[in-house]
Image (cartoon, rainbow, N blue to C red):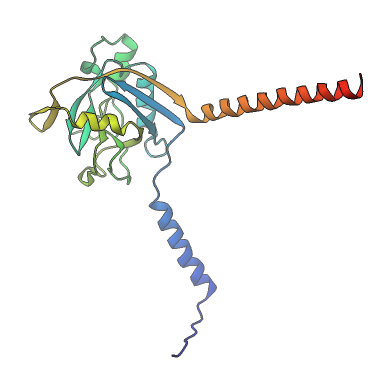
């Protein structure tokens, strides 16, 4: 067998490597921010995170609704197995009445922040009307891949925990109303809360540091008593 040595310019190799690197990065999943939101439903909890670099205005809007407690007593009005579990608009979807500030925020619309992020299982996607800038507070949790939605609805987050709860949703009896498949039993969001994963980490580190400092203080005192009785 003959060995064939081919000389390739270093600059060409660098360009090829750069293209491969950029291509690989573009295929990576966008990173979640540090905030996590938990919806506590009558069938279990669902936790999700936000994608602030993909849909910053949508994230700000939804997170403000969460902080105001707008999703409390709201519900999932739509559960289409293998497709979506959709949260109702807070205006009209809640059991408890909205206060003035909640209603004002709930009635706001947000610009359509459409991106290249794919509609795959677990992502959060805003609901809207025909107007691309008509999204308010309703959004879907994808129960399966839905490529036909790509580029048409704003993806702003991803489910991080609660798949078992979503599976329970899919097992509920449903009825069809037009294009919507709806559960016959109400799936209520009993309450919501949020936390910051970075702050949680800091609290843990602070606790460890306190224990180390306490241990050091004990050792210093022991040495002092030994050397300076």
Residue name at image x 38 percent, y 22 percent: 64
- Closest to the observer, 2 or 10: 2
Q: In this view, does 24 lie to the left or right of 134?
A: right
Residue 209 in which image quadrant = top right
* On screen, residue 6 above or below 26: below
Residue 45 in which image quadrant = top left
Looking at the rendered structure, the number of numbered marks drawn on it comes to: 0
Q: Which residue lies furthest to the bottom in this view?
A: 1
- Closest to the observer, 132 or 46: 46
* On screen, residue 172 above or below 94: below
Query: Percent position (x, y) of residue 152?
Result: 24, 41
Quarter of the image with the C terminus in it: top right
Q: Is residue 227 visible?
A: yes
Q: Can residue 133 be seen in this view?
A: no
* On screen, residue 52 above or below 186: below
* On screen, residue 149 above or below 141: below
Residue name at image x 33 percent, y 31 percent: 162
Q: Is residue 48 left or right of residue 78?
A: right
Residue name at image x 32 percent, y 14 percent: 102
Q: In this view, does 127 lie to the left or right of 24?
A: left
Residue 32 in which image quadrant = top left
Q: Is residue 228 left or right of residue 170?
A: right
Q: Residue furthest right?
A: 228
- Closest to the observer, 112 or 228: 228
Query: Percent position (x, y) of residue 123?
Result: 31, 38
Query: Percent position (x, y) of residue 212?
Result: 69, 27
Query: Percent position (x, y) of residue 30?
Result: 40, 43
Quarter of the image with the N terminus in it: bottom left
């Amino acid at each position: 067998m003959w060995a064939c040595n081919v000389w390739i310019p270093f600059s060409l190799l660098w360009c090829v490597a750069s293209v491969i690197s950029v291509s690989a990065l573009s295929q990576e999943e966008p990173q979640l921010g540090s905030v996590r939101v938990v919806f506590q439903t009558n069938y279990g909890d669902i936790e999700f995170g936000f994608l602030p670099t993909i849909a910053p205005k949508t994230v700000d809007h939804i997170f403000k609704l969460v902080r105001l407690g707008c999703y409390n007593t709201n519900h999932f009005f739509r559960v289409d197995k293998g497709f979506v579990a959709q949260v109702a608009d807070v205006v009209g979807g809640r059991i408890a009445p909205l206060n003035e500030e909640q209603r004002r925020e709930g009635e706001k619309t947000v610009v359509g922040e459409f991106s290249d992020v794919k509609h795959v299982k677990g992502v959060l996607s805003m609901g809207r009307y025909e107007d691309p800038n008509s999204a308010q507070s309703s959004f879907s949790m994808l129960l399966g891949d839905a490529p036909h939605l790509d580029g048409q609805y704003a993806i702003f987050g991803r489910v991080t925990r609660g798949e078992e709860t979503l599976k329970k949703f899919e097992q509920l009896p449903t009825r069809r109303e037009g294009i919507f498949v709806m559960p016959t039993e109400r799936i209520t969001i009993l309450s919501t809360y949020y936390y910051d994963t970075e702050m949680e980490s800091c609290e843990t580190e602070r606790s460890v540091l306190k224990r180390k400092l306490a241990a050091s203080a004990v050792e210093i005192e022991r040495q002092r008593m030994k050397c300076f009785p």
